[in-house]
Amino acid sequence: MKYALGNFLLAFAWVALTGNVSLENIIIGYIIGLALLSTVPQTRSEGRYFARLWKLFLFVGYFIKEVLIANVKMLGFILSRNERMRPGIVIIPLDIRSTIGVTLLANIITLTPGTLTMDVAENYSYLVMHSIDISDPDTARREIKEGFERRLMEILE
């Protein structure tokens, strides 16, 4: 927690010193703060900050890749004349149990073109997802669990 706060304060100090309050400058200040903090000796718990941050960057890249793939698939459905779509509903059992984790997972699924989170169990044991193309429900479940859910659990652990 000290590293997260320190990184935020260093980014704020960078913005204050440069006098430029823009998204690009904030990101530059954050990166400079990361570089400075990486030179400070870390305890075991503080070292997790950098590991989580790296996993977060990897997750964002994975999410962008999945959104691009989903957009290409949707374009293919729109442009094709044949009826290849197999819409369906899948129940996905969840391993992630935190409120923030399930909320993030549900929203990420909904943000991906062609998929929509319809419901979440009150005890967070499963999630109901609609997809515009489900040829194999087991594959759809596995892709969500091994893709988004596993990566979110690594970040939120």
Image: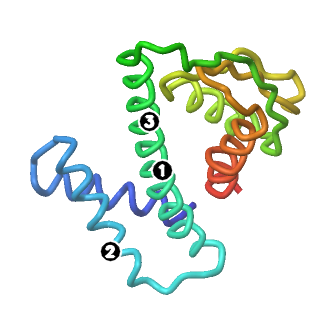
Distance CA(mark 1)–CA(mark 3): 9 Å
Q: Element under label 2? A: helix
Is 96 placed above or below 130 here? below
Pick whichever of labels 2 and 1 is earlier in the sequence: 2
Q: Element under label 1? A: helix
Structural crowding at the residue carrying mark 2, measured as other residues with C-alpha within 10 Å and reported as few (<14), some (14–19) or many (≥20): few
In the rendered structure, which amino acid carries the disc numbered 3? Answer: Val
Closer to us: 102 or 27: 102
Query: What residue is drawn where x is 78% and y is 38%?
Result: 138
Badge 2 vs badge 1, beta-carbon distance below 8 Å: no
Residue 100 picture location, percent across and down: 68, 36
Dot 2 corresponds to which residue? 35
Nearer the camera: disc 2 or disc 3: 3
Dot 3 corresponds to which residue? 67
In the rendered structure, which amino acid carries the disc numbered 1? Answer: Tyr
Q: Which mark is residue 14?
A: none
Indicate the quadrant where residue 84 lies: top right
Q: Residue furthest front?
A: 82
Residue 24 picture location, percent across and down: 18, 47
Query: On the picture, is 23 further left or further right than 45?
Result: left
Q: Element under label 3? A: helix
Q: Quadrant of the C terminus?
A: bottom right
Pick whichever of labels 2 and 3 is earlier in the sequence: 2
Dot 1 corresponds to which residue? 62
Query: What residue is drawn where x is 78% and y is 27%?
Result: 127
